[in-house]
Amino acid sequence: MVDQPASPIVVENPWERLNAFTDARIGLGRAGVSLPTSKLLAFQLAHAQAQDAVHTPLDVDALASELTEALEVSEAPIRLHSQAQDRAMYLQRPDYGRRLNEETREQLQQAAASQQRYDLAVVIVDGLSARAVQQNSVPFLSTLYQMFKSDAADWQLAPLTIVEQGRVAIGDEIGALLNADAVLVMIGERPGLSSPDSLGLYMTWAPAPGLRDDRRNCISNVRPAGLAVEEAARRFFLLLKEARQLKVSGVKLKDRSEDDVLEGDAAPGSIRNFLVAD
Amino acid sequence: MAQAYHSTVGSRSYRFASLAELMAKATPPRSGDRLAGVMAESAEERVVAQMVLAELPLTTFLNEALIAYEDDEITRLIMDEHDAAAFAPISHLTVGDFRNWLLSDHATSDVLAEVKAGITPEMAAAVSKLMRNQDLILVAKKCQVTTAFRNTIGLPGRLSTRLQPNHPTDDVTGIAASILDGLLYGSGDAVIGINPATDNVAQSVKLMRLMDEVIQKYQIPTQSCVLTHVTNTLEAIEQGAPVDLVFQSIGGTEATNRSFGFDLSTLAEAEAAAQSLNRGTVGRNVMYFETGQGSSLSADAHHGLDQQTCEARAYAVARKFNPLLVNTVVGFIGPEYLFDGKEITRAGLEDHFCGKLLGVPMGCDVCYTNHAEADQNDMDNLLTLLGVAGCNFIMGIPGSDDIMLNYQTTSFHDALYARRVLGLKAAPEFERWLEEMQIFQDVSTHRLNDQLPAAFANSLRHLPKEPRHG
């Protein structure tokens, strides 16, 4: 090539096809040294969706009626609220989000007055993404409840609870009030730029207020483009059975359902770093 | 014994029960201090605290430890290694006078370099609480801290970047793709540094080798780092892995660092081990530290101090071990510590100022999470302010989106914006390499090459045919 073509206004990157190998925003091209308009707006949309996920309130009525129908339970879920009155308070005071407010704690105590013991209490919490909870709770619990029904053992499930402005640890207080051996908290995770709808699952054996994070097991990134609900339910059920057998949870209970070492390159030597291939 | 401080404004009298309380209440507002319950209760109380603080002699901080000497090895480090001779020229000043002196024409770059060993983190934190943003920028600009390993970082008129090619599964091709993207946008002179998705020795060694091969093949005058726990890196060194820099997150109290799983002796061991490898070509700074306001409170290890004072104490830890790079990851921790763009901006400028004043090679991860009240415009503002202030380095990541850590930081494009608008350049050795590799048409005017440079065009031919994932 002898002639240098005149520089276009937006310069595409010749390595743009590397996009097929990663979700990272590579090969974006440039106007001068700046982002082209289309790439700028794509970013702004992703950020807007993540922010909306944080600030859009959970539609508790809709979720409650969907759950009642899908899970074929007789009682409607119990509605609870943390000590954080609103989102602004929630974001600044994580300690408030970990405890029930006075009013709903009393309600829960009355509901649990029968002293019946349960194998598991399922607690649905808005967390940092109501969208994650709204979208993934029903499919996940439908799968999980089916597993309970098909299992040889008899599983006593506590009434479902839905918590507004809650953090993970609030499940420990609820599980304890409900006399449950274990608690599952389903909570909206902090939204990533490309994952505004990610649900997190946390399990504690023998829940009680004030337990630390090392007593919980976590299954993360449950969403259509991440960990599928079927796989998430399978992993959780395995964890729960092991917790019930060993009567522990957290770091003392290893998640045997997934591998410990990440092998990005599937088989040894199958894929080399293309930057240094000769 | 701790003494109380009093002041009266009109009919209202104020009492501050201790030096720690006075420092906390003099601090510009932020959510982490509110969460800790140490923040001023009114705007007036805050300014009264600043006025009382301004009257305190700097020597107060040598006579009264904010965390007891017996209880905390960082207090002992600060007190035992204080350089009285370096302190002599400013020993007669109050905190308020110290601000005037720092801004004055007496405090030239050379003079500031001479007194830095006489300044304690608490003195730096105290004076910063009286300073406006422009004061923090102006004084930091006068403090030059230069370090070196395979290139020279922190020279006047330079702004370096850490190329951060993180990937959620540490996929080799995915990481290599982000490294290529970064290099072709002129990023990576501070370090090529990966946060591993899984934090163990085997994984870290794999990533170290990956980066080492790239640096060797293209003869890049830069260094690599896997941001794994210091004890993992020590083990990797024993296994013979190619370790350039040793990483560790550090905090400003002994209890914070214990919660991170190390103490000062661990860092001393790590510095010695990395230096013994003799991998640097132009310098021997082998440590890379990260900090951030709020980490001590988060670890329940703040001893009732405000988060900015804890942060400044972390720089005493850093300067003990001659780091190549230190950066404050200012917006990563979340809105319960720094609520919005305004608080993040203020904290970033404070951290950069305090670090530079103490002689630490400060960079900044200009960043935010999606639950903070912040956006790209806030990052543009802080990036520009830090560029003006002479910040040593910032992060560089494809399109601002860290797909592993799920937060937003400065992009490759952002760094070029800052270099172009402020007339800043990459580290000199790296700048020459960018020119030789034809990554830029004209590196002095920041004109990138529209064509793919030959060396990299060849590499792209070795791409796997099919992506292995969807």
Image (cartoon, coloured by chain):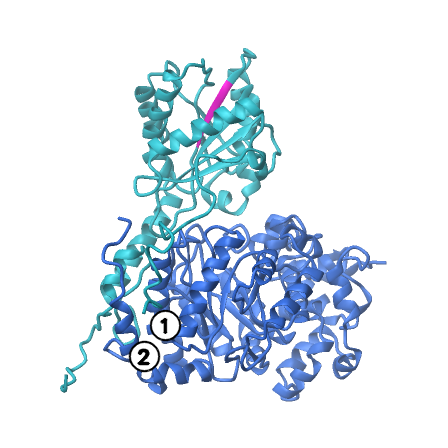
Q: Is residue B144 visible?
A: yes
| Circle 1 residue | B183
Q: Nearer the viewer, residue B409 or B323?
A: B323
| Observer able to see residue B131 | no
Where residue B247 appears, as percent x and y from the top left, is: 56, 63
At horizontal 26% and vertical 68% (from top left) the residue drawn is B460
Say whether mark 1 and mark 2 are on the same chain.
yes
Per the rendered image, the range of residues in magenta is A119-124
- Left or right of A172? Residue A134 is left
Circle 2 marks a residue in which chain? B
Q: CA distance from mark 2 to mark 1?
A: 8 Å
**Subunit of label 1:** B
Quadrant in which residue B402 is drawn: bottom left
Q: Could you tell me the amino acid type at mark 2?
A: Ile
- Residue lying at 54% horizontally and 30% vertically, measured from the top left: A204
Question: Which residue is at the front of the view, A266 or B46?
Answer: A266
Check the image and report above or below for B227 versus A86: below
Q: Is residue A70 above or below residue B90?
A: above
Give the mark nearer the N terminus: 2 vs 1: 1
Question: Relative to residue A11, is residue B170 drawn left or right?
Answer: right
Q: Residue furthest right?
A: B1
- Which tint was used for chain A? cyan
Who's blue, chain-wise? B
Task: Measuring from the top left, give residue B29's x and y in whole percent.
Answer: 58, 58
Report whether B91 appears left or right of B459. right
Q: Amino acid at mark 1?
A: Leu
| Contact, mark 2 vs mark 1 (Cβ under 8 Å) | yes
Count neighbours of disc 1 (C-alpha within 10 A) and say few if under 14, some if 14 to 19, many if 20 or more.
some
Identify residue for label 2. Answer: B439
Q: Position of residue B77 (x, y in %)?
A: 75, 66
- The secondary structure that dominates the magenta segment is strand
